[in-house]
Image (tube, rainbow, N blue to C red):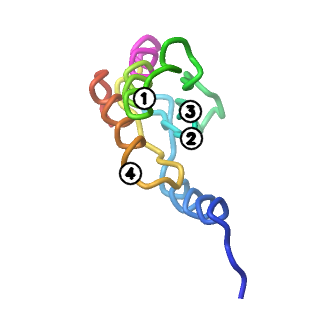
Amino acid sequence: MSVKSRSQSRLRRRRRVRAKVSGTPVRPRVSVFRSNRGISAQLVDDLAGRTLAAVSWTEGEVRTMSPMEQSEALGRRLAERAKAIGVDAVVFDRGGYRYHGRVKAFAEGLRDGGLTV
């Protein structure tokens, strides 16, 4: 019997999610990464293999916010960047994390910013 670490279990869940979620130029995928210190995300066009826009917790004044405020602010910031390149709808890839807490706050920030998730 083998014992799986927390990161191995997350990667297994991530692969399961990615089998069902794919981004297109019209509706790119929002890939979320959450660490203990912050959150980062990218808009990805999987057909072309390109990152269209990205945000990270290390940007400007977001760094000093609490984790929940940080997540929501980054969601709104990514929504602004997506609107600037002409994207109105996205597919949300939670990356093996539960849709709960900071990941949920990020998705709500995207919706507040005007994107269809």
Q: Taken as a whole, is the magenta stretch helix, strand or loop?
A: helix
Query: Mark 4 vs mark 1: which is more N-terminal?
Result: 1
Residue at 37% over, 46% down: 101
**Residue type of the residue flagged with mark 2:** Phe
The percent position of residue 17, horizontal first and vertical second, equals: 50, 57
Q: CA distance from mark 2 to mark 4?
A: 12 Å
Q: Which residue is mark 1?
A: 66
Q: Which residue is mark 4?
A: 99
Q: Which residue is mark 2?
A: 33
Provide the secondary structure element on which disc 3 rests.
Answer: strand
Which of discs 4 and 3 lies nearer the camera? The answer is 4
Query: Mark 2 vs mark 3: which is more N-terminal?
Result: 2
Question: Exactly how many numbered labels are in the figure?
Answer: 4
Residue at 62% over, 63% down: 6
Q: CA distance from mark 4 to mark 1?
A: 19 Å
Contact between labelled residues 1 and 4, with CB atoms less than 8 Å apart? no
Q: Which residue is mark 3?
A: 45
Near mark 3 (Cα within 10 A), the count class, few <14, some 14-19 or many ≥20, is many
Which of discs 4 and 1 lies nearer the camera? The answer is 1
Query: Mark 3 vs mark 1: which is more N-terminal?
Result: 3
Span highlighted in magenta in the image? 78-86
Contact between labelled residues 1 and 3, with CB atoms less than 8 Å apart? no
